[in-house]
Image (tube, rainbow, N blue to C red):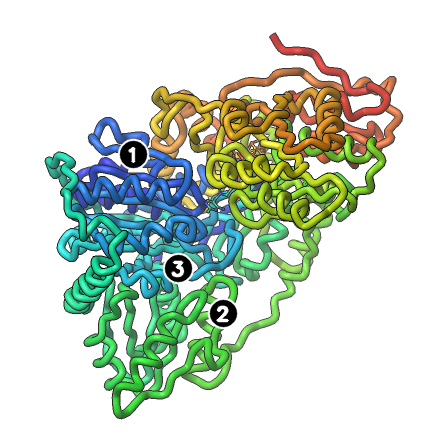
């Protein structure tokens, strides 16, 4: 039984952060864990930062965890992965979609957009384990607007000791609107396979 | 299946606001009202989806005062009710709540008020707990979604027993936390509304009656004091002589932090009712502990009250809290801040913290922009253009803003609004500046929902005084910022069923405005003309209704008006589309120049007006 697992799901409004975090939270409930999800809604649809703190295990009470305490971070946007480093430590695992919706300030040229290689290098130099995937293009190939369920597959494969694969799929079925379920399960399977290749190394 | 309709005993995953909605069903409410406001809105949104099925009347009203009075009448008539609002909404409703404390209720009534320490989405960090003292009404202060649900049920019971409305005060970390919740029984109370004719109770015109009702209220609160110690949201843990008094979500941080610090002998008093305070519990804690730390968010309500209360006792413990610098007054607490305070309190030093190099990576800021295709962006662009074309400098023409998505226009590149104060203040402040003698044009910009909420009285005054102000009503046919709720100006109700649309044009004309024009903000050329006319008007109030559906809502309904592309033969890479308009669907590519991202573009077509070289081409979609 997991004592305490601290997950941060992050991204930008419109990328499906809240749906992903709900699926994982429901999976945790179905696995008989206590569950707490802390988030601040309001800007979730409008291209602002979305952070969802998902905590589960035997002993969780509060909706937030301390900085540095994340066991895992799922980032649907690589710039947001970099922003979430404050919640991480060297034992945190990052699962990152290597795409970004550039912040307006960078489009306007007021701030600079860190490029993907720069972010990857920072993770490497600081010895933080991070896996990067072009999950958005996989989602697009299935005509899905967001990569969240691809990343769910990635997460599920890496943490298959915690969650039964079928539990994740049944939670997905409950949360995703019926007519998109099958496509999202396909996305989940593809995500799972992506991680398979990595875990084999 | 909708989880808020689950069976008693079932464990389900619910957001705090959904849990509160479930609590209303378990408490047998008949009527639920409110005005939207983050973080309170999901209570009504959850209930309106099932209102018909469960036979509860659920509706949005024009503002919090109206919503409160609608619910009050139901509770006066013996039904159970709940009204929901964010903290500033309580200020709007408060006039009515003070009087309601004198007449009381017959059916139980909950006033949900959601505070926002942080703040995350609110204009101020108001601590609404003080309203419980001001109005003299009971107030519950839960720390989790489960407690919030249970508090609604318990609160409705004691409200009915005391015959007083009961506040349920939450914070964002309760409303927007999702957790596993155990459901209770849903209750159905068959009641018919009957309004009792009882003049001394319901008429505040006689000073003698008012004095008597004040005494009645104080009597009721004496009864409430007897109940307070048994409030199920309180908990007392007596261990060592170092103790912590806490409430709300801070309690959860305290418990987790003590565990992480391996402290097993700290006493804890959690207070779940802030008026009347549980005096017996507090007294036993004060006599048990020698040192007491207060851990609470925002203004030190418990610390003020209990420090004062302890002066009635002979021996007082030593107190630590915000008043002597252990915790900040501003912002929300979190486990790290609580850990620092608890460590200082117990070990006289903050915890050891390794410096974290991971925080050093520099990330660009990401304030939320207006959506691609947002009609507000086009309207402000046209307004700013008109001001410039008339030869005014930007700093000549103040643009008073109001609360809603259009306040996001303060960001670059538009930087349109000069103020965002509180609901409705744009029109009154524009009027105020003119009234004070300002001799250049003055503009107020206000959303449709905000106009119905608090814009009408000021507009009536502006007409009455015949001041030359320009009022732009940004009519995107919805209350967008808070999650797309209806208002009196749209043709549907909270549950989506048909309602009568109150046309803003008629309202404005009815208030006596002679110059009223309706424009489509996507038609920027016409907009600029109308704004120019308004800004040069010297004959009283000029109202422009910029009417076009919220782009996010249109997108959800699958509407995309145009296909938009860039003709690179014409584009000279001047960057105007990006640097003057700031639509997030247009990115810059160093080789190609501007690039429109089809998945982000909502097809408003406004950018075709922006490009000075007509390089942005639009095609109407069929
Ligand atoms: C007294 C008060 N009640 C509620 C709110 C929450 N709130 C913020 S903006 C807004 C309304 C926005 O609607 P509208 O004016 O139509 O503008 P839109 O967001 O649609 O552009 C509300 C209800 C508030 N800030 N203050
Ligand atoms: S939600 Fe609607 S009103 Fe708000 S920024 Fe988006 S398009 Fe504009």
Residue B58 tag number? 1
- Residue in the picture at 41% in, 36% down: B62
Residue beneath label 2, please?
B329
- Mark 3 burial class by Cα count in 10 Å: few <14, some 14-19, many 20+: many
Q: Chain of mark 1?
A: B
The tag on residue B128 is 3
Q: Is mark 2 within 8 Å of ligand 1?
A: no
Numbered disc 2: secondary structure: loop
Crowdedness near tag 2: few (<14), some (14–19) or many (≥20) residues, C-alpha within 10 Å:
some
Q: Nearer the viewer, residue B195 or B557?
A: B195
Who comes first in sequence, dot 2 or dot 1? Answer: 1
Secondary structure beneath label 3: loop
Real-space CA distance between mark 2 and mark 1, rounded to the nearest whole angstrom: 37 Å
Q: Residue sitting at 43 percent across and 33 percent down?
A: B485
Residue most extreme to the right: B572
Is residue B352 found left or right of B295 in the rendered image? right
Can you give x and y, in whole percent of width and height, for residue B527 in the image?
70, 24
Disc with the residue nearer the chain's start (2 vs 3): 3
Where residue B423 sits: x, y (%)? 51, 45
**Residue found 64% across the figure and 44% down from its top:** B430
What residue do we see at 50% from left, 71% from top?
B328
Quadrant location of the N terminus of chain A in the rendered image: bottom left
């Amino acid at each position: 039984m997991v004592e305490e697992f601290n997950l941060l799901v992050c991204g930008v409004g419109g990328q499906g952060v809240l749906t992903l975090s709900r699926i994982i939270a429901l999976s945790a409930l179905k696995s008989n864990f206590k569950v707490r999800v802390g988030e601040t809604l309001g800007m979730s649809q409008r291209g602002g930062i979305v952070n969802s703190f998902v905590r589960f295990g035997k002993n969780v009470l509060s909706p937030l965890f301390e900085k540095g305490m994340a066991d895992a971070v799922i980032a649907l946007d690589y710039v947001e992965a970099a922003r979430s480093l404050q919640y991480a430590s060297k034992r945190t695992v990052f699962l990152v979609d290597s795409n970004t919706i550039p912040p307006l300030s960078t489009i306007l040229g007021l701030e600079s957009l860190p490029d993907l290689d720069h972010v990857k290098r920072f993770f490497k130099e600081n010895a933080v384990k991070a896996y990067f995937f072009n999950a958005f293009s996989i989602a697009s190939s299935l005509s899905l607007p967001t990569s969240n369920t691809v990343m769910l597959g990635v997460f599920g494969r890496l943490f298959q000791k915690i969650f039964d694969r079928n539990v994740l799929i049944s939670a997905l079925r409950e949360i995703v609107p019926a007519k998109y379920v099958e496509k999202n399960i396909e996305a989940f399977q593809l995500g799972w396979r992506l991680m398979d290749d990595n875990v084999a190394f | 299946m909708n989880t808020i309709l689950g069976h008693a005993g079932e464990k389900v995953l619910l957001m705090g606001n959904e849990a509160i909605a479930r609590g209303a069903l378990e408490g047998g409410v008949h009527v639920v009202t409110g005005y939207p406001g983050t973080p309170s809105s999901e209570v009504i949104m959850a209930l309106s989806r099932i209102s018909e099925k469960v036979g509860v009347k659920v509706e949005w009203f024009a503002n919090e005062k109206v919503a409160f009075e609608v619910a009050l009448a139901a509770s006066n008539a013996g039904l159970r009710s709940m009204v929901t609002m964010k903290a500033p909404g309580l200020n709007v409703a408060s006039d009515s709540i003070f009087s309601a404390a004198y007449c009381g209720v017959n059916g139980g009534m909950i006033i949900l008020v959601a505070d926002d320490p942080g703040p995350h989405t609110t204009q101020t960090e108001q601590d609404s707990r003080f309203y419980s003292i001001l109005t003299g009404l009971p107030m519950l202060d839960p720390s989790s979604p489960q407690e919030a649900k249970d508090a609604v049920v318990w609160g409705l019971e004691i409200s009915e027993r005391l015959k007083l409305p009961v506040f349920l005060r939450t914070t964002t970390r309760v409303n927007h936390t999702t957790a596993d919740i155990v459901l209770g029984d849903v209750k159905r109370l068959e009641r018919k509304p009957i309004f009792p004719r009882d003049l001394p109770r319901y008429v505040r015109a006689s000073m003698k009656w008012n004095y008597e009702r004040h005494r009645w209220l104080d009597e009721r609160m004496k009864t409430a004091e007897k109940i307070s110690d048994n409030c199920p949201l309180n908990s007392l843990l007596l261990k060592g002589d170092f103790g912590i008094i806490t409430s709300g979500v801070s309690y959860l941080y305290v418990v987790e932090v003590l565990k992480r610090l391996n402290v097993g002998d700290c006493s804890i008093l959690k207070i779940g009712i802030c008026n009347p305070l549980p005096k017996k519990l507090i007294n036993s804690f004060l006599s048990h502990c020698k040192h007491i730390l207060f851990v609470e968010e925002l203004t030190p309500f418990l610390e003020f009250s209990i420090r004062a209360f302890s002066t009635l006792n002979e021996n007082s413990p030593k107190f630590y809290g915000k008043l002597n610098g252990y915790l900040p007054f501003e912002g929300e607490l979190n486990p790290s801040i609580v850990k620092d305070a608890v460590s200082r309190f117990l070990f006289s030093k903050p915890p050891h913290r390794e410096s974290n190099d991971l925080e050093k990576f520099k990330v660009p800021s990401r304030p939320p922009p207006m959506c691609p295709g947002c009609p507000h962006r086009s309207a402000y662009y046209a307004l700013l253009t008109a001001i410039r074309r008339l030869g005014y400098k930007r700093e000549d023409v103040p643009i008073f803003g109001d609360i809603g998505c259009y306040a996001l226009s303060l960001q670059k590149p538009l930087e349109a609004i000069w103020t965002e104060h509180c609901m409705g203040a744009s029109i009154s402040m524009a009027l105020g500046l003119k009234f004070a003698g300002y001799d250049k044009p003055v503009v107020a910009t206000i959303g449709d929902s905000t106009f119905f909420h608090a814009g009408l009285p000021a507009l009536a005054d502006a007409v009455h005084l015949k001041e030359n102000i320009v009022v732009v009503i940004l009519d995107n046919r919805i209350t967008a910022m808070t999650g797309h709720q209806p208002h009196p100006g749209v043709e549907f109700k909270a549950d989506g069923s048909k309602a009568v649309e109150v046309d803003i044009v008629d309202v404005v004309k009815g208030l006596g405005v002679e110059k009223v024009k309706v424009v489509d903000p996507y038609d920027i050329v016409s907009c600029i003309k109308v704004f120019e006319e308004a800004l040069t008007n010297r004959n009283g109030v000029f109202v422009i209704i910029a009417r076009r559906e919220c782009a996010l809502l249109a997108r959800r309904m699958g509407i995309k008006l145009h296909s938009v592309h860039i003709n690179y033969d014409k584009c000279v890479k001047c960057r105007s589309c990006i640097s003057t308009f700031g639509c997030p669907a247009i990115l810059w590519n160093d080789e190609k120049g501007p690039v429109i991202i089809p998945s982000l573009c909502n097809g408003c077509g406004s950018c075709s007006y922006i490009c000075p070289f007509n390089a942005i081409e639009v095609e109407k979609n069929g």
